């Protein structure tokens, strides 16, 4: 189990991906699609590394984690040391302003992420993350998105020429993390989605 961020930052919408959800995501990505073992993987908005560490433990060839938050990356480094993982590099960067025009374009077989949902301070942030992920992936992107935005995401996927598959419908238990939260926890319906470049390749 990876160490979480003790003081999450509200402006970055930092909510931890639970180990249960991360394990289910990664197991499905590997066993159903074979998109982790031996693959070059990117973890966007990697945070403390629950997805990245899991992907490394499942045998990815190499992984790069990208995050804007230095504190989260320091914890990720500690988790890598604890699990004795050495095929992971971390880059501090703003995912949305630097990756699309970077040398990473179409460099990764697989991109995994739990992006900010963009509901409080950053409307549309999930779509910016998705656009960046599609730009740097050559095969598939796996991401979590609020079920209530599914039709909008389907339209965007069609506009961008990528295929979309809702792999699973999950319940994301969002704990009382920030001062503006009134309830102890909120159960959010979330889609686990696979985006692939197959549609674009067929054209």
Image: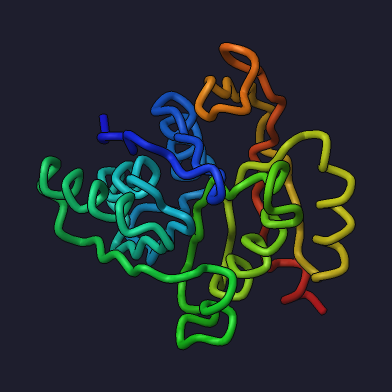
Indicate left or right for 29 with 185 as reference: left
Q: Nearer the viewer, residue 12 or 96?
A: 12
Image position of 45 with respect to 29: above or below: below
- On-image quarter of the C terminus: bottom right
Considering the image in quadrants, where does the N terminus appear?
Answer: top left
Residue 134 to residue 194: above or below: below
Q: Nearer the viewer, residue 186 or 153?
A: 186
Q: What colour scheme was applied to this rendering of the protein?
A: rainbow
Residue in view at x 20 percent, y 61 percent? 87
Residue 153 position, x and y percent, is: 81, 52
Horizontal side, residue 39 vs residue 158: left or right: left
Quadrant of the image occupied by residue 23: top left
**Closer-to-camera residue (33/1):** 1
Q: Residue at x 42, y 60 (%)?
A: 67
Give the vertical position of 136 relative to 153 (above or below).
below
Query: Vertically, is 14 above or below 171?
Result: below
Tag count in the figure? 0
Determine the residue located farthest toward the front in the rendered image: 179
**In the displayed structure image, the side of residue 1 where residue 147 appears, left or right:** right
- Residue drawn at x 39%, y 57% is 69
Estimate the x, y position of residue 106 in percent, counting from the top left.
54, 79
At which x and y percent is residue 7? 37, 37
Identify which residue is drawn at 61% across, 70% down.
132
């Amino acid at each position: 189990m990876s160490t979480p961020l003790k003081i999450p930052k509200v402006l970055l919408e930092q909510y931890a991906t639970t180990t249960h959800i991360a394990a289910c995501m990664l197991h499905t990505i590997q066993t159903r699609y074979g998109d982790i073992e031996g693959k070059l993987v990117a973890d966007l908005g990697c945070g403390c590394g629950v997805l990245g560490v899991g992907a490394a433990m499942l045998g990815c060839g190499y992984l790069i984690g990208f995050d804007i938050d230095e504190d989260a990356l320091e914890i990720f480094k500690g988790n890598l040391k604890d699990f004795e993982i050495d095929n992971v590099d971390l880059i501090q960067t703003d995912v949305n302003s630097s990756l699309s025009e970077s040398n990473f374009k179409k460099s990764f077989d697989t991109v995994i992420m739990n992006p900010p949902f963009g509901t409080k301070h950053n409307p549309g942030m999930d779509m910016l993350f998705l656009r960046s992920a599609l730009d740097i992936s050559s095969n598939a992107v796996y991401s979590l998105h609020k079920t209530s935005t599914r039709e909008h995401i389907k339209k965007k996927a069609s506009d961008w020429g990528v295929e979309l598959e809702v792999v699973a419908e999950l319940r994301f238990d969002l704990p009382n993390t920030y001062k503006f939260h009134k309830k102890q926890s909120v159960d959010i319906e979330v889609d686990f989605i696979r985006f692939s470049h197959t549609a674009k390749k067929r054209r």
